[in-house]
Amino acid sequence: MIRRSLQTLGKAGAGMVLLAALMSCAVAVEEPVAPSLKPQARPAAPAPPPVVAKPTSQASAQLRQYLNQVEQAQLGQGLLRQDGGGTDTPFSADVLARNFEQIAFYNEYNSAFTGRGGASPLRRWATPVRMQLIFGDGVPPSQRRKDTESVKKYAARLGRVTDHSVSFGGTPNFLVIIASEDDRNAALDIAATRVAGISAGSLQALRNMRRDTYCAVAAYAAGPDASTYTAAVAVIRSENPDLLRLSCIHEELAQGLGLANDSPGARPSIFNDDDEFALLTRHDELLLKMLYDPRLRPGMTAQDAAPITRILARELTGGPL
């Protein structure tokens, strides 16, 4: 798969030490001076220095070339579709319910990112999701502008679909890192200082991404049954070409809301290892609606939720109840 997802669970806030940097300042006392007869104009504040991307290493350049080849090969095979599905991808209420169970009640990978995950309770956010972007120093300004627009537009869409608050601004709890092989570690160091409940050690798996892992997300859950998300960090390789990078944004941010797994039977969907679809589909929007329906509760098992899940799927597809 081109977009692997990592679910890291922890007790957010447990034993955390918050550090604040204090800047001391000295006040000099001078002799009084006579007031000026004419108001003096304040000197203009210096303009901030322009953002200039740092040169990339040979390893990053080679990775960029490799990912461009991957995108072209997949497009040549009819993959990375952007149409959201159509008459060739019908799905019934029963199929939607089955896909929801496979995607919402299992983890794609374990916390060490070394193997497949297992069954898990339903997990989602209870508090508003506040996203913030962190760019690596090697990301050029033009790409930063494009990716910022993409992430903000998609976050707004996720908020509409789930009817849950997803926004930018305020104290962040969901960090989206877009960085290269050269500056990913530095960006993760910054991330560890910005969100309560996240430590540098808990981000270790995101530092050691395999070459064929183009993006990943770590979500942190708290509560008695560790089923309510309190923080998340998504990492997207900036070396990805435009469509692969956008596909990473779509999958990792949605997985960070609680759709934690992939299923080979999910179609039309981005939650499938075959990469047929690059962008969130109508089928996937229905999965998100189900996930945040108040009739389901964090901590539910697949067995507990099954009767409700079938009702929700039939309501959303117009099938018989």
Image: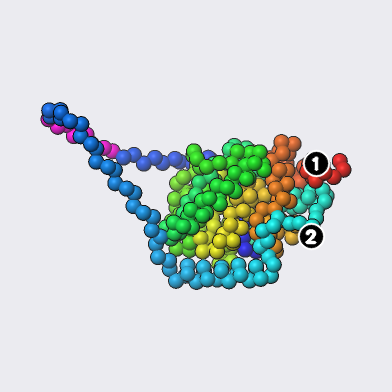
Q: Residue 32 vs residue 114: left or right?
A: left
Task: Indicate the secondary structure of the residue bearing disc 2.
Answer: loop
Distance, label 1 to label 2, CA atoms, is 22 Å
The spot of residue 284 in percent (x, y) is 70, 50
Q: Which mark is residue 110?
A: none
Evaluate whether residue 309 shows in this view: no
Is residue 30 found inside the magenta-colored segment of the image? yes
Q: Which residue is mark 2?
A: 88
The spot of residue 247 in percent (x, y) is 61, 58
Relative to 36, residue 309 above or below: below
Q: Which residues are magenta?
A: 24-32
Say whether marks 1 and 2 touch (CB < 8 Å). Answer: no
Residue in view at x 44 percent, y 56 percent:
141
- Structural crowding at the residue carrying mark 1, measured as other residues with C-alpha within 10 Å and reported as few (<14), some (14–19) or many (≥20): few
Residue in view at x 39 percent, y 55 percent:
51
Q: Which residue is mark 1?
A: 315
Residue in view at x 55 percent, y 50 percent:
151
- Structural crowding at the residue carrying mark 2, measured as other residues with C-alpha within 10 Å and reported as few (<14), some (14–19) or many (≥20): few
Is residue 271 found inside the magenta-colored segment of the image? no
